[in-house]
Image (spheres, rainbow, N blue to C red):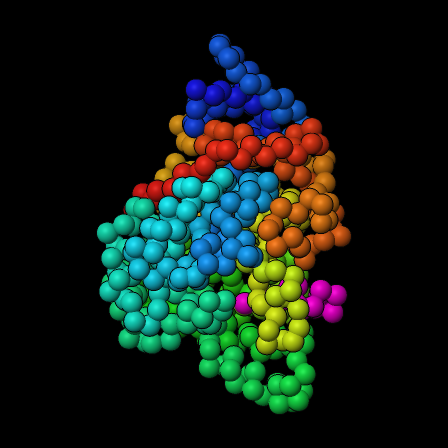
Amino acid sequence: MEKYLIKNIQIVNEGKIVAGDVLIEGDRIAKIAPGIQTTGAVTEIDGSGKHLLPGVIDDQVHFREPGLTHKATIYTESRAAVAGGITSFMEMPNTIPNALTQELLEDKYALGAAHSLANYSFFMGVSNDNADEVLRTNDKRRDVCGIKIFMGSSTGNMLVDNYLTLDKLFRESEVLIATHCEDEKIIRENYARISAEKEGHLDAADHPRIRDEEACFSSSFTAVQFAKKYTSRLHILHISTARELQLFTNMIPLAEKRITAEVCVHHLHFSADDYARLGYQIKCNPAIKAPHNREALWEALLDDRLDVIATDHAPHTWAEKQPPYEKAHSGLPLVQHSLPLMLHEHKAGKISLETIARKMSHAVADCFQIAERGYIREGYKADLVIVDLAGTTPVHKDNILYKCGWSPLEGETLGGAVSQTFVNGRLIYDNFYGKMLLHDSYRGERLSFSR
């Protein structure tokens, strides 16, 4: 049994920062206390000047396997994730083939078991005509994170716009329903109008005009109405507009919410002003919009109308991100840099370390009812990340681990750095002394849910 003793570190957990030691034995946190002494073989780590956070849980990633492995694989992207302090992820069904049957879903779990360095779960996919198959997930609710409904089309063309299908799923699903909310009719009308205005010469800055605030609000409003009708467990992904925020509340504790919402790091970091500089690099669905939306998202995140922070990590090759508008793929790679981005915002005074731990770990575990993860507690799985606020994370081609090989953050230096990442008590990523090591022979575990 491997043992690690992290000494003299600032422990960021459950709204507090407390100095102490943490003993890891096997895959568990064995003890949390000042001045821990232990016998036998143990690897001791001096955490002086650093902070210990629970490992990040990312509830929305696209790792592209199977079928799109020229962009990414479960191995390459989970490797990038642990380097960014992410110890668990939930992956989306728009791979090839789409995960629209229970058998295809289990095929993805087999890939995760074989290749993922982080802990993993996979969403069951929904189409207009597979509702009965989706509802078989009710029998696997302790083993599957949820079902994913694309209420707006995105990469993979899994649009669900049949109201009878939506009604049946919101009525009968016993697992969490995660939705991508954009109104397809509004998007198509906007596209036709703006394309005509510009005689077909669209550019990246037109993206938030085509996939506008109204398209997002209309679809999110519909999802909320279905959820309220049946008291469904709804989680709306990647909120991107100020207008949608009226659909969510901070008047009740997260544990009692039936409707929750996610914000992604790129909607917190970029705005429509950045299209002039980055163009199609930041084309994504839903679109990055005007700056007032970004400021509203920050306000709602900090006052708990928005519950969790995620990435929607969606890598494409550099060639796939080039014009023209219609051919430039939507999505950007983020898992290696989401925690460093939030550390950067912390150093800028925008968010506390306690809130980072809550929104990227505690709240995700609570939202999805993930068993024994998301907190630094004795007896819990030892998914942990050591961060150095005195360090920096420069983003350049030489240190990008995404298979696609690029990042919209290239050229930026983020304040704060991930020093070490533990997954189930194993030291997977080690950059403690400025020399990056990835111990990639270990594989993560399938997440379980206490539903």
Q: Is residue 271 magenta?
A: no
Q: Is residue 187 left or right of residue 394?
A: left
Q: Is residue 79 left or right of residue 101?
A: right
Judged by its main secondary structure, the magenta piece is helix
Viewer-proximal residue among 122 and 8: 122
Q: Is residue 232 left or right of residue 335?
A: left
Instruction: Write the residue at 24% across / 57% down.
Output: 136
Is residue 133 visible in the rendered structure shown here? yes
Tell me the quarter of the image containing the N terminus: top left
Viewer-proximal residue among 122 and 95: 95
Q: Which residues are magenta?
A: 272-285
Is residue 376 visible in the rendered structure shown here? no
Image location (x, y in percent) of residue 148:
39, 61
Instruction: Write the residue at 55% across / 42% down.
Output: 79
Instruction: Write the residue at 47% across / 21% down.
Output: 2
Q: Is residue 233 above or below residue 349?
A: below
Instruction: Write the residue at 51% across / 13% down.
Output: 41
Q: Farthest top residue?
A: 39
Image location (x, y in percent) of residue 329:
58, 68
Viewer-proximal residue among 321 and 276: 321
Q: Is residue 235 above or below residue 426?
A: below
Image location (x, y in percent) of residue 421:
56, 34
Viewer-proximal residue among 156 and 136: 156
Badge count: 0
- Residue 265 found in image quarter: bottom right
Image location (x, y in percent) of residue 339:
60, 45
